[in-house]
Amino acid sequence: MSKITSQSTSTARPRKARQSAPPSKPTAAASGSLSIRPVRRGDLNAVIEIDAMVTGIAKLDYWNSLYRRYADAVATGQHFLVATISDEVVGFVIGEVRDWEFGSPPCGWVFAIDVRPDARLGGTATSLLQAICQGFRKAGVSKVRTLLSRDNTLILSFFRSQGMMIGPFIPLEMDLEP
Ligand SMILES: CC(C)(COP(=O)(O)OP(=O)(O)OC[C@H]1O[C@@H](n2cnc3c(N)ncnc32)[C@H](O)[C@@H]1OP(=O)(O)O)[C@@H](O)C(=O)NCCC(=O)NCCS
């Protein structure tokens, strides 16, 4: 569940202001049609770059390991999808179906969703979430969950816009003594 607690410092903007003042220069989202597909090895550099833009850290080993675990694992309920515009990766989503974790019946978990800054506000994340939810449905589950940092109002605004609400779980943590 760690990725959703990323250190994004982006802030939510008033929706009305954005609707009345669209970006003045063309964005990636405006320049071609959007496709969603499973990740390929050749997408990894773009994924690492997008993640580094958001978190400020390029985690090569982490992404290579995630790719090995998720790329060909759709049959086991694991999903790693990318959004492309004109064959260029502009965003990604990662998640999986977990059985009886935290005592709950099987459900889909979204661990990470990121869109490149110049491709945002064009429906890319919405399409990514819809695609992964479709995969969860095919895997037989009817609920999707995520976990996010309470300071990340941007991702909170996004998930709320998709209809997600506060769930029945409380996250707990403590420091471990060495
Ligand atoms: C959150 C994020 C994934 C949204 O991607 P996106 O492609 O711009 O999202 P969409 O265009 O599909 O937006 C859907 C809805 O989300 C909400 N939303 C998106 N960006 C918003 C913003 N900056 N402020 C407020 N609401 C926002 C809106 O309700 C929007 O619907 P609308 O356009 O009809 O108003 C993207 O901004 C991002 O990657 N942010 C940083 C990454 C991050 O913090 N990820 C979480 C850690 S994994």
Image: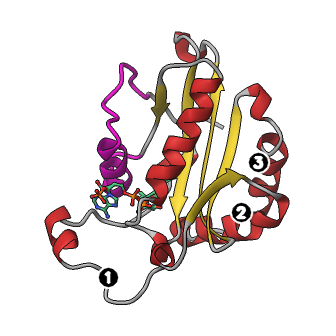
The quadrant where ligand 1 appears is bottom left
* Quadrant of the image containing the C terminus: top right
| Residue that mark 3 sits on | 66
> Can I make out residue 56 in this image?
yes
| Residue that mark 1 sits on | 23
Vertical placement of 31 versus 150: above or below?
A: below
Colour setting: secondary structure
Question: From the viewer's perspective, is the residue at label 3 or at label 1 nearer?
Answer: 1
Type of amino acid under label 2: Lys
Instruction: Find the magenta span and give its range.
Output: 149-171
Give how far across and how far down residue 170 sits, in percent. 38, 24
Ligand 1 near label 1 (Cβ, under 8 Å)? no
- Label 1: few (<14), some (14–19) or many (≥20) C-alpha neighbours in 10 Å: few
Type of amino acid under label 1: Pro
Q: CA distance from mark 2 to mark 1?
A: 31 Å
Q: CA distance from mark 2 to mark 3?
A: 11 Å
Image marks 2 and 1: residues in contact by CB distance under 8 Å: no
Question: From the viewer's perspective, is the residue at label 2 or at label 1 nearer?
Answer: 1
Disc 1 secondary structure class:
loop
